[in-house]
Image (cartoon, rainbow, N blue to C red):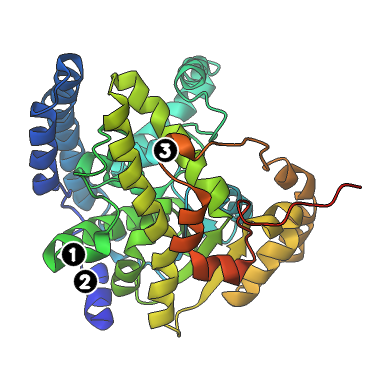
Amino acid sequence: MGKRAGVLAEESHAVIFHFNFSNYFKMLRLAWREDLLAVRCYFLAVLLLWVPPVSLFHAVCFFLDGILFPQMLRVKIEKPVFMVGHARSGTTLAHRLLLADEDRFSAFMLYELYFPSLLQKKVIRALAALDRHYLSGFLEKRVQAWEARHYRSDAHEMGLTIPEEDDIVNYYSMASGFWMTKMPYMADLDFYHVDDWPQRKRERLFRFYSDCIRRELYLNGVEKTHLSKNPTFSGRVGSLLEFFPDARIVVNVRDPNETIPSLLKLLSRGYRQLGWSVDRQLESLRAMADISYDTYRDPFDVLEAHPDVPASVIDYRELVSDPLAAVEKMYNDLELPMTDAYRALLAKEKKRAAEHSTTHTYSLDEFGLDRDEIHTRLAPLFERFGWVNPKTAPAEADV
């Protein structure tokens, strides 16, 4: 299977834009059955009036790529690095630390994920250069003002020119987990368990994904290594190894007593804005909690079945306390040489990484969970990483 998939990735039809019609029509049905009229109209407007023309535009540009940039078709994706792990486990911090090794890695910026065509990327970069040269950055300032309004968050720094999760490249293909933040029908839509999708459906998805990576490498440097970080990819590690046989895997881990309620709290804000009842919110949050348990277990299950795959585990505690040591360990595990310049840069990151820690606390009761359940569902990992169940841990003695 691995050999077959590797050939598939190299000989893919790189001018065909992928659109998952089965997901799209299922989302339409869910939107049509929505009880709240305002929410139903909003979802249907997005799916019927916005998605089709945007996806068609991307499809046309994707096709033109093959005509305008035929050399792109010969770009090879060699030994990509895929970083997975539960949301809030330090994947963003680790990803951006690694991208500081600029001569080695290539990654998508957010705007490049929303505009997956090589033609689109080149036009946007050309317009940005003209704006800087002739308009003194007038358009750039307008874009920055728009970013300040739309990407303000204390949970996750985002921006159009900041590296982001590869899964967004599948957004207008209707195959991205980010749709779960827009249409939060967690019990009905499953963008996580991709390894369980039918073979043909997975082939179409990963053919398109590899074509997008190929375009990015053509733009950033064919000699570079693609670096991806995606919590939702925890459910497709098996497929990543199938379609990228020489891939290397990095798993970020953090105490689930911190990550799971943090994610649920973030999602619950969006549910309240929809006007959903408490029962409907809890139903989707319960489904998301079940996915969270899989997010922790699935990467290790796949790697255990593939012991020859180069892999590394980054513990969040080590990442924020000593980023140099954490990244050095990962480089050693993946057999990547580290330059002196990059090592010196990491040595300066200790203070900034420590600031990544949070003092937020969350009540599990509001999500219908308790710490015993988390400990029971993830007991082997609690033992492996020395996480403590606060509910059963002995109280510290007073000093």
Question: Dot 1 lies on which element?
Answer: helix
Which residue is painted at 60% across and 56% down in the image? 389
Position in image of residue 383 (x %, y %): 59, 70
Does residue 92 appear to the left or right of 197 in the view shown? right
Check residue 203 in the rendering and tell me which mark sits there, or answer none: 1
Image quarter for residue 286? top left
Position in image of residue 55 (x %, y %): 17, 36
Q: Residue furthest bottom?
A: 308
Q: Which residue is mark 3?
A: 367
Q: Is residue 155 above or below residue 379?
A: above
Q: Amino acid at mark 2?
A: Leu
Q: Is residue 79 visible?
A: no
Q: CA distance from mark 3 to mark 1?
A: 36 Å
Disc 1 to disc 2: CB gap under 8 Å: yes
Does residue 209 appear to the left or right of 159 in the view shown? left
Q: Which residue is mark 2?
A: 8
Question: Dot 3 lies on which element?
Answer: helix
Question: Dot 2 lies on which element?
Answer: helix
- Give the mark toward the camera: 1 or 2: 1
- Give the mark toward the camera: 2 or 3: 3
Position in image of residue 228 (x %, y %): 45, 56
Q: Report the front residue among 299 and 14.
A: 299
